[in-house]
Image: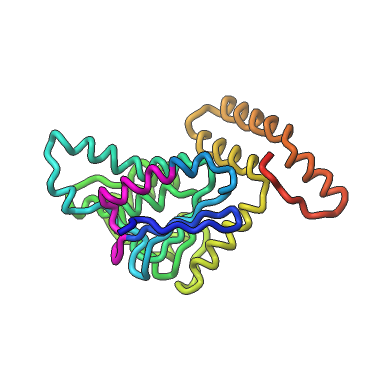
Amino acid sequence: MEMIKVNFADHICTITINNPPMNILSKEFREEFVPFMEELKGRPDVRVIILTGEGDRAFCAGADLNEEGELTPETVRLFLEEDCRIYDIVNEMPQPVIAAVNGYAFGGGFELALACDLRIMSERAKLCAAGVKVGLVVGPTRLVRLLGEAYAKEVILTGRTITAEESLQRGLASTVVPHEKLMEEALEWAKMIASRAPIAVRHAKDVIQKTMEFNWQDAMTMELDAFIRCQETRDHKHAIESFFNKQTPSFEGV
């Protein structure tokens, strides 16, 4: 069975984790997903990526516990590095990645949702780091960077489940919609981003993600450098011309 389903339309790539009912992150999934994402990096025709789970139960319920149970002190770090590559590659994609969270996002699924740039959630979505429930540590680094130390401690140390509504209140979700409207809503967000100047979108994502790594002056220098690179593009010049002509610009990514 193929572990991912893929659809391309309107500069948007929709990827569905196809390992129902809980869409766990198996070895087979890693071996299919990571190379596919590496290939997507070099595709300028893909401007936005949507990531979701097959079925109505789970976005992704995390790692395969059978695989985890077979680990030894000698093999555990390699397993973790391979597992983290799933989340890291989502985070490092030049295109924005939207998580359409259609159900449970537990453990590694929680990490995967956090690695995405935006999270559109079904009202049925439930998120949980889950690590402390099974004697492990899951999710603190990404959650601290997204929402701060205090909230990360509350969620990680208790291992409690976060509802879609709480996710919205805390800023983890961009919006929450009825379950049957989830993909329609995710596509609307993706189309909005895909309609913007793609070179500028990619530079903006890069600057935002790197800002926390630098002091204020270095971060501002990086931002201004990105502005300068975008200012030289055809898309920018076309957008200015369209503005004065009262027209809607059509961006080509050049």
Image quadrant occupied by the C terminus: top right
Identify which residue is drawn at 56% across, 36% down. 207
Instruction: Name the residue nearer the viewer: 246 or 177.
Output: 246
Toward the right, the furthest residue is: 245
Coordinates of residue 128 in the picture (x, y in percent): 31, 57
Residue 29 among those drawn in magenta: yes
Toward the front, the furthest residue is: 1
Is residue 149 visible from the viewing direction of this image? no
Is residue 124 visible from the viewing direction of this image? yes
Residue 185 among those drawn in magenta: no
Identify which residue is drawn at 66% across, 30% down. 224
Instruction: Name the residue nearer the viewer: 249 or 223.
Output: 249
Horizontal side of residue 33 vs 199, given as left or right: left
Horizontal side of residue 126 vs 236, given as left or right: left
Coordinates of residue 59 in the picture (x, y in percent): 37, 61
Location of residue 81 by image quarter: top left
Q: Identify the coloring.
A: rainbow
Coordinates of residue 92 in the picture (x, y in percent): 46, 39
Instruction: Name the residue nearer the viewer: 176 or 200.
Output: 200
Identify which residue is drawn at 51% across, 72% down. 181
Position of residue 203 relative to residue 248, above or below, is above
Location of residue 140 by image quarter: top left
Identify which residue is drawn at 48% across, 57% down. 14
Q: Which residues are magenta?
A: 19-37
Number of dots carrying numbers: 0
Horizontal side of residue 18 vs 70, given as left or right: right
Image quadrant occupied by the N terminus: bottom left
Coordinates of residue 184 in the picture (x, y in percent): 54, 68
